[in-house]
Amino acid sequence: MNNPLRLVIDAVLVIAVAVLFYLHFANKPAATPAAARKVVVHTDSTGTATPELEAVADTDKIAFVVSEELLNNYQAMKDARKSFEGKVKGWSNQNDAIGRQFQSAIQKYQQQAASLTPEQRAATEQQLEMQRVKGGQLQQQLQQKAAEEEARMTKQVLDRVDKQVERYGKENGYRLILISAPSGTIAYGRKDLDITKEVTAYLNKEYSAKKK
């Protein structure tokens, strides 16, 4: 039997994550690059020269990551999806139970209708209508709860990705790391600029260390 709640969740998982990933980064400033160093001599008021190391931004290194590939291979997202799907299964069972209860009440009424008085039929039909409305409200609440949980889960993972991509960019001297997504603006990028595998490995290493 088709499960409306399950269909909603499946659509959300397939489409929303990649779109949210792109939107999450689209308006953020580029990761601050790691600084190269050069020696600069500063002279104070007494004429004493003091050599110091001064940061020089690396303006050459630019790369991109493919959002769908990164998220599909990021262990934190895999774990989050697994946890979410477990919750969805519980909500789907509740959704199915509501439908079964209403169908059972309808069948019972149909079996007894011939023996009921007009007043009893009217009262029973009113009760059935109230049960239908209440069941629909409960099902809507379950769908809303699922959508809110999916959004919370996705934001939590994307916040982690955000911080780690920024750190990766700084540590490796990138001026800019772009996001290639279905809704993105990168029409073409040289393959050697694709650092998705490197960034994914970096993210998974950090996530694995956090879990220990």
Image (cartoon, helix red, strand yellow):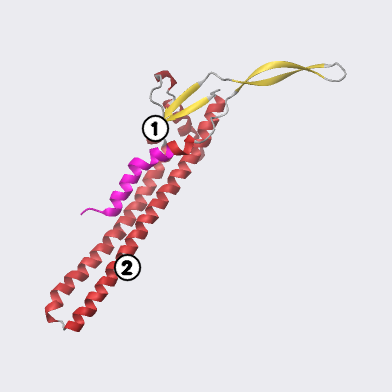
Q: Nearer the viewer, residue 76 or 173?
A: 173
Q: Earlier in the sequence, mark 2 or mark 1?
A: 2
Q: Which residue is labeled 2 in the image?
A: 134
x then y, percent, for residue 87? 36, 52
Q: Amino acid at mark 1?
A: Ala
Q: Position of residue 161 (x, y in %)?
A: 48, 36
Q: Is residue 13 magenta?
A: yes
* Image location (x, y in percent) of residue 83: 39, 47
In this rendering, the answer to whether 182 lies above or below 117 is: above
The residue that disc 1 covers is 181
Q: Is residue 99 left or right of residue 35?
A: left
On the question of residue 208 being in view, the answer is no
Label 1, residues with CA under 10 Å away: few <14, some 14-19, many ≥20: many
Above or below, 30 relative to 47: below
Residue at 43% across / 44% down in the picture?
A: 154
**Circles 2 and 1: CB atoms closer than 8 Å:** no
